[in-house]
Amino acid sequence: MKKKLFGILIAFTMGILMTESIKAQTKLDSLLPVRGFCIDAPRPVGLDSFVQFIDRELAPRKVNTLIVQIEYHYQFKSHPELTDSFALSKADVRKIVSVCKKNNIRLIPLVDLLGHQSWANHNGKLLKTYPQFDETPGIVMPEKYEWPNADNLYCKSYCPLYPGLHDVIFAVIDELCDAFESNAFHAGMDEVFFIGDDKCPRCGGRDKAELFAGEVRSIHEHLLQKGREMWIWGDRLLDGKTTGLGEWEASFNNTHRAIDLIPTDVVICDWHYNRPDKTAVYFAMKRFRVITCPWRQPSTAIIQINDIISFRRESATDMSDRFYGIMETTWTRTDHFLQSYYTPQPAADPNENTPWNCFRVMYDAINKLP
């Protein structure tokens, strides 16, 4: 009898705890529907460590969205010529999918489209393989990269009007979304400095906002046909001159007008790393769902968390749900992030400006929300 009563008591207690846990989760979901983490794809040799990190660190902190910047580090069947070095196999990706399913984490692959087709003094895999897609083929990659430079070369772009381009990138998108079992795709599209180049026989003289919006619409339409959402970074949709945000966090080449030319169901990832600018309000007023994205400054991330919660609480019903959440970005190799994250730092400054410390502080604060 005692064992039976003890079992009933345990079951009752567990039921109460589970109910309270569900209530806490529901409340957190109402405060921050998206609690994201964006990181580079792991090397195959570090895959198991990455899977453990998802299970042991992201899940307990109630991260519910994981963006993996896969780029071309995947063993493509549709376009094997685009498979870059240290590429993950479908079986590798399945391990990431499995641990995310286990922990109810939404998994979204990211490939930089339009811009970021080169880095420093070398082209990325797409332009290496298909040099004809280059928007500015006349700009030769330097032996030693420096910024600023005479060509205003930060990163190259592909020509969005080049015939056959979309056949290639759409096949890549489809294969990755299938492998990641994802109902969304992050297309990047940030920091596009080269667009509508005067020397391009297809783009020269065209409105840069129209070109940018046209590329968003093309990718969006393809994803929509597959029942998938489109996510992008938001900087090219902000006017750098009017806002004073500058040419990195916003546009100096007039692409900002594209904000009125693209579908409003595109999810905007609005990044500000050094100052908690309130541009989420602008995107929400334009009817977009917006996710605020910090990087390495914990003090900035805390303000951004509080801002999103305040915007949701204090806005009209039509606006509030558009403040979609917050997402930590990392911008370093996964193995470097994990090594730094797990390095003991007993005397570490809680305001240390690193992505791994920002992640800790940010999610500690999120999980202490009342």
Image (spheres, rainbow, N blue to C red):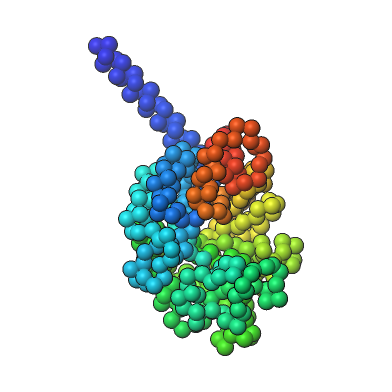
Which of these two is toward me, 9 or 275? 275
Residue 315 visible in the displayed image: yes
Give the mark count.
0
Residue depicted at x 41% and y 31%: 19
Please determine whether, in this image, residue 21 is positioned above or below residue 66: above
Left or right: 247 as drawn, with respect to 228 = right
Which of these two is toward me, 219 or 112? 112
Please determine whether, in this image, residue 199 is positioned above or below residue 359: below
Q: Where is residue 146 in the image (x, y as percent from the top left)?
A: 68, 68
Residue projecting furthest to the bottom? 201
Residue depicted at x 68% and y 73%: 152
Q: Where is residue 171 in the image (x, y as percent from the top left)?
A: 38, 71
Residue depicted at x 37% and y 26%: 14
State which quarter of the image contains the C terminus: top right
Left or right: 10 as drawn, with respect to 334 = left
Q: Where is residue 216 in the image (x, y as percent from the top left)?
A: 52, 71
Which of these two is toward me, 261 or 318? 261
Residue depicted at x 40% and y 31%: 18
Residue 218 visible in the displayed image: no
Residue projecting furthest to the left? 1
Q: Where is residue 119 in the image (x, y as percent from the top left)?
A: 57, 67
Please determine whether, in this image, residue 270 is positioned above or below residue 121: above
State which quarter of the image contains the N terminus: top left
Which quarter of the picture shows residue 209?
A: bottom right
